[in-house]
Amino acid sequence: MAESVVPTFGRPWTALQPALSQAMLDAVSSLGFENMTPVQEATIPAFIQNRDVVVEAATGSGKTLSFLIPMLELLQRKRTRLSHTEVGAIVISPTRELARQIFTVLQELLKLTGLSYTAHLVVGGSSSATNTADEMSVLKELGPDILIGTPGRLEDVLCGRLRNGKRLKSGMITASGGVRGRPSASAAKLEVLVLDEADRLLDMGFEASLTAIFSTLPKQRRTGLFSATMSEALGQLVRTGLRNPVRVQVQVRDRTTDGSGGAERRIPASLAIRYLVCPPDRKLAQILRLIQTTGSLKYIVYFSTCAAVDYFYRLLRRMLCPVPAVVPGGKRAMREEKDRLREHFTYSASISVHSLHGQMVQSKRQATYESFSAIPPGEAAVLLCTDVASRGLDIPDVDCVIQWDPPTDPKSFAHRCGRTARAGRSGKALVFLSPGAEETYIDFLALRKIPMSPADYLWQDSDGAVTTEAPADAVSLVVEEEEDEDEDDLDETGDDEELDEEALKNKEDEQKKRRRKRRCRNQDQLSKYPADTRSDALLELVRGLAATDRDIYDRGKLAFVSFVQSYSKHEASFIFRLKELPIIEVAKGFALLHLPSMPELRGRPVSRFVPFAIDTDTIPLLDSKREAHRLEKLEKAKLAATEAKPDDSDSDSKGKKKKQKKKNNTDAWTDAKEAKDRARERKLKRIKRRDAVASVEEARLMQEIEDPKIREAMAKDPLLAKRMISRRDKSLRDMAEISAQKSQRSRQSEQRSLDDIIADAKSTKRYQQDSSSSSDEDSWEALARKEAIRKKLAAKSKQRKRFTFNPGFSDNEEEENNDST
Ligand SMILES: Nc1ncnc2c1ncn2[C@@H]1O[C@H](COP(=O)(O)OP(=O)(O)OP(=O)(O)O)[C@@H](O)[C@H]1O
């Protein structure tokens, strides 16, 4: 159980210089806040005294009041009055939930101070254009003194992108970039601009909206940037138009037993983060065992994809809070299922399970957020979510944050953990890492001043009690060395196209050996872990559930595929390497019945995966109407397949020979094409690696310059300062050059792929026409063009399909993409 610790607060509010208005002092005292937090004590006076501020302080340290209080104070001191359509202050947040939360705190402050400013929440996700139009007419009627919102919708309001509640099409944008619609509010006399979670907002995803918003703001204004990971965005600050800003950085130090200050950390002192290195198929059992031992706590579990949230939400709801309606076979089946589960998880009280991600409709997102926030301490509840709930949310009484997998964006790690241990309260966080390359993540975070300690692996004895002692029957896994068939990662250095055949072969052999060794090392890592038969049995139980519920079965597959795809998108790609991911154990961890066919499984030890004995077509949907529809479709598809099958008697030996001949003809061509593709892929990898090295170098230089010791040295030694700055500038120039090269390369590769398509089409035609025929070049060209158009259309329709059937990667960009009604 998390204990409460006394937070280290600063001086009382009355000690602030310049002093706050009496109404504000009364308001904070009514909120029950006697003293300021360190970030409030440092930021409020500077902001009130008309300074721009860049504020970095740990999660849960009270940054919201650090900008809302000075914002209201500055508005009161404004000499000229705002007209009915003019905006005095704007707060921009990356997510709707965070904007709503800031809006709630602001409304509370306005109520307690008695100030009569009108504040509006300006976020996307309205259920219809009519609702959006209504919101806009309310805004115009009441006057927009303060706007709090997300970038997309704020752009709509300030740049006039809305007409009758609908976003204008890009065709209605003028050549100069302006829009033909009328802005609903004017920000020409804006007094204060705040970017909360500024580093996230300054990421590329929000660039277009922010640039459009900034273009409507006056240069003479106060700007405040706030985040727990602000230093990550220092390179982009210049875009925000800050003038000689005050930098507030609240340092946290490790607690030491003797009371002396320990090492610096970027997370709250009351937050204990642990990591557990274990095979990926043990995570589910570990989470259930943790809940079983820790008792009635409030947990948040983070996943990197929406599909994984959906899958585990359905699974855990069925396991932890079953109702007869969702268990096929009714009450009796439910009782039996519960009894089987009790062998793996014994917990007497009920546990509520919730889910939240960016692909949910806004009303459901809001309802989940409110109901999870309302759960009182002492009641067990689990919220499964993506990074959409990682930043800024102040959910009360969260005791423990679990990360099923580390976030794709390393910055999110501290934000995810920061949902617990807020405002001086203590909290715990746990992250799962796979054995091998992922263990480097521990050092990677330590460098970013996020210390972690190892967690105990939890076992279960034969009675189901949780212990940290491995049972006597736990034996080491013996993992066979797999034969490496993977051919597509051969190159590490140099340009293979320039090597002769023999040298290339030798190089390939050597690289194969190296890769096999690396993979064996990973298998060795896995084999260190003694078998956990009870965890395996739990996964079998889950597979049993999937075999009786098509919804769970389908979502499991989707979750696995989206996990694998998101894994290759990790920003820290030097740690999270797909080639080294124990992908078979990941598939087991998702309790799949069969392995899906996907290229990532090529050359992997698939024999270690035991398929579930079932014809998957027979797995029913629990909803009888949907099931009847599915069966009907299945029947039709089977019928169509039998009709399309050619009659065996038709295929005489002559035909077979012809087919074989044709195949032989195409083989050589296909091989050559594949070799070319592989060479291209290798080249791309090299380029990517070079880019990654350059960006790491840049980050390192920026960090060096930010290091207080180096800054001190630079202040003393102008020569050193000059050298450091010129090194950084050179690195920035390199980055710019690399990005120019990148765009040139992408143009070239586009051209190349069109050439390829033409070449493909020509070859296809050649084989179709029998190699001896002398067809003229012009008709090939025409055919090639047609083929190119056909392929492009096919790719587009595939993309469209992918869009409607989105497996759900991380939904960080959700405001950017979904803000329209
Ligand atoms: N002076 C204070 N005294 C006591 N509690 C405070 C004080 N100021 C803020 N709090 C409380 O601290 C909690 C965290 O505050 P807030 O949400 O502003 O943190 P934050 O720094 O913005 O966190 P994050 O980085 O996660 O967004 C809130 O519940 C808030 O009510």
Image: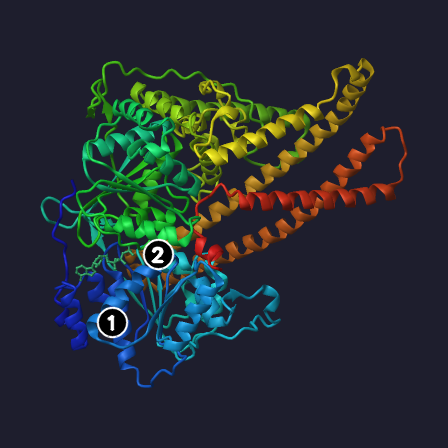
Q: Quadrant of the N terminus?
A: top left
Residue drawn where x is 49% and y is 32% of the image: 627
Above or below residue 461? Residue 184 is below
Reading the image, the residue beneath label 1 is 110
Above or below residue 585? Residue 252 is below
Residue 561 appears in the figure: no
Residue drawn where x is 33% and y is 60% of the image: 100
Disc 1 residue crowd, few under 14, some 14–19, many 20+, Cα 10 Å: some
Disc 2 residue crowd, few under 14, some 14–19, many 20+, Cα 10 Å: many
Q: Nearer the viewer, residue 574 or 454?
A: 454
Q: Is residue 598 left or right of residue 107?
A: right
Reading the image, the residue beneath label 2 is 97
Check whether the beta carbons of the residues at disc 1 and disc 2 lie within 8 A of each other. Answer: no
Residue type pointed to by label 1: Leu
Indicate which disc, 1 or 2, sits on the residue closer to the N terminus. Answer: 2
Quadrant of the image where one finds ligand 1:
bottom left
Q: Is residue 25 left or right of residue 122?
A: left
* Secondary structure of the residue carrying numbered label 2: helix
Residue furthest out toward the left: 258
Residue drawn where x is 27% and y is 74% of the image: 72
Asked which quadrant contains residue 3, the reply is top left
Q: Is residue 492 left or right of residue 662?
A: left
Residue 464 appears in the figure: yes
